[in-house]
Amino acid sequence: MRFTNPQFRHRAFISEVSGTPSRSLARIDDRPIKSPVRYLTCRFSQKCCNAVAFCANGTLSKTECLRSVPSHTVPIGQRSLARNHCSELRLCLKTCTQYEPPAYISIKKKQMKNFSNSLVTAIPQLLRRVSLPCAILACLGLAGQVTADDLPLGLKPVPIPKDNPQTAEKIALGKQLYFDKRLSKDNTVSCASCHAPEKGFSNGERFATGVGGAKGGRSAPSVINSAYYRQQFWDGRAATLEEQALGPIANPIEMALSIEDAVGRLNKIGGYKSQFQKVFGTDANPDGIAKAIAAYERTVLSGNAPYDKYKAGDKSALSEAAERGRKLFFGKANCAACHAGSNFSDNSYHNIGIGMDVKDFDKGRVAVSKLGGDTGAFKTPTLREIARSGPYMHDGSLKTLEEVVEHYAKGGIANEWLDEELFPLRLNAQDKADVVTFMKEGLASPDYPNHKAPKLPE
Ligand code: HEC
Ligand code: HEC
């Protein structure tokens, strides 16, 4: 079944074919069973299209992509198979710029032993289709990469835009700007007020508080590892950190200072003027401010956590409880369906039912993508250093990680757009505690980027 209408992607997940009724279906979709056997269609094609469209930066529209990549159907009862299949393919697209077909296929072939024949033959076929967009992407060379020697264990090289290479001077300048309250109207708020290193680069409150105590309706996400997101903000409305950086300065409920005024202020401060001259060869201007802040943000990284050491072979790096939690996280608790890859985010958007129980709920991603299926969907956040940045979720509505796990265990909050990866989990109290332990211990780094405010220029 093809997702010709993305609005129905959550429904298209199940397609009907002939055969005998399956009991497991009822757990996935409790609408009446009309025809005897149903097949499960993985939602990969939608995700792939998101990924490809992001990578290709508009070269390939989502509609074109939907046409070029077939979705995949497997019998119900092999639900986990469908899920694995989807994540494998998702992975391919995620790494599409570095993707090398031969290696990929040979590894996969081994893992595919248990897959049905039809699946095995379908994969190379899918990959061939996928490699075209991948080739386009490779040519585009959208984002160069640095291979820093000091890259924390477990992290991929940070994607660095070609037009904003990292330099020590630029990072130092960006760090000063990040901590400087003079970039707000009444000199009371800096980026660090809402994204404070000592609070997991968030603010410890349900909502962010800007100039004059103004509050918005969303929580401040952590800046940690935001360099890896394909898009910024809960709804992904900014494409890059550069694009994101000027928003909060001018936002009336954040720093409330027009960009012209910000530029004017910086150029009156000798120490800034000279640094901008040195780094960019001009006085301070909006482009330079954005680039410097983004360059600094790309140094706010967390890796080398017990989980990374464990993965690298040190089996003693996780406590027994954290190790049980790890298994559940990647298995029965289904967390890795979305919190995937080295940054524990699939860079995609899902409705997990948060805030959906009020009439005028936050519509999330749909405002940007205009795809009905994205209603109430938000970006999957990283889980690295997650114990530090509560309260959780886009509306800060869950205070603790225990509450978060409870939310998932009951299958989220039912609503029309709930992601199909959410369903009641069969977790006992010990299991739930173990998942929490995995996040608290396993994903907290001893090298936490506990940055201190630098000396600010006069
Ligand atoms: C008043 C509080 C506040 C201030 C000040 C503030 N932010 Fe934010 N920031 C937020 C909130 C709230 C969001 C999420 C908004 C949304 O998604 O709609 C956010 C989102 C972000 C994101 C996106 C992260 C992600 O996971 O998508 C980045 C990066 C960021 N801010 C950096 C900055 C920088 C740089 C500054 C200073 C120039 C800054 N912020 C100032 C509250 C603030
Ligand atoms: C369907 C995809 C999906 C699955 C499955 C999933 N998550 Fe999430 N997770 C998300 C999204 C999307 C958000 C943000 C949702 C929002 O704010 O509305 C999120 C948010 C979170 C947060 C809060 C992060 C923050 O910075 O506020 C935590 C913690 C978390 N998830 C842990 C888990 C755990 C543990 C599991 C498994 C039990 C899990 N997730 C399963 C997609 C998923």
Image (tube, grey):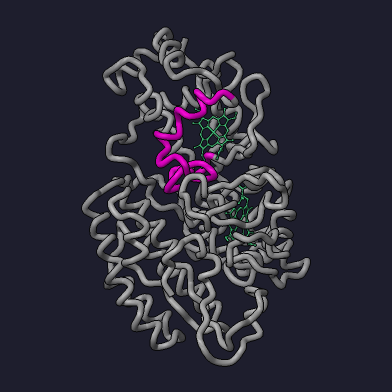
Residue 174: x %, y % from top left: 43, 27
Quarter of the image with the N terminus in it? bottom left
Badge count: 0
Q: Which residues are magenta?
A: 223-252
Compared across the picture, whether 309 is left or right of 218 comes to: left
Compared across the picture, whether 349 is left or right of 213 comes to: left
Q: Is residue 236 magenta?
A: yes
Q: Residue furthest left?
A: 139
Residue 72: x %, y % from top left: 43, 76
**Can you tell which quarter of the image residue 77 is in?**
bottom right
Above or below: residue 435 compared with residue 121: above
Q: Residue furthest front?
A: 34
Compared across the picture, whether 200 is left or right of 90 comes to: right
Q: Is residue 272 magenta?
A: no
User: Which quarter holds ligand 2?
Assistant: bottom right
Judging depth in this view, the residue of 308 and 351 nearest the camera is 351
Judging depth in this view, the residue of 252 and 21 nearest the camera is 21
Above or below: residue 112 compared with residue 367: below
Above or below: residue 433 compared with residue 388: below
Residue 381 visible, this angle: no
Identify the residue at image location x=64%, y=37%. 217
Identify the residue at image location x=31%, y=49%. 58
Above or below: residue 286 compared with residue 372: above
Q: Residue furthest right?
A: 429
Identify the residue at image location x=66%, y=59%. 415
Compared across the picture, whether 317 is left or right of 172 comes to: right
Residue 344: x %, y % from top left: 52, 56
Residue 269 visible, this angle: yes
Identify the residue at image location x=42%, y=85%. 113
Residue 201: x %, y % from top left: 58, 37
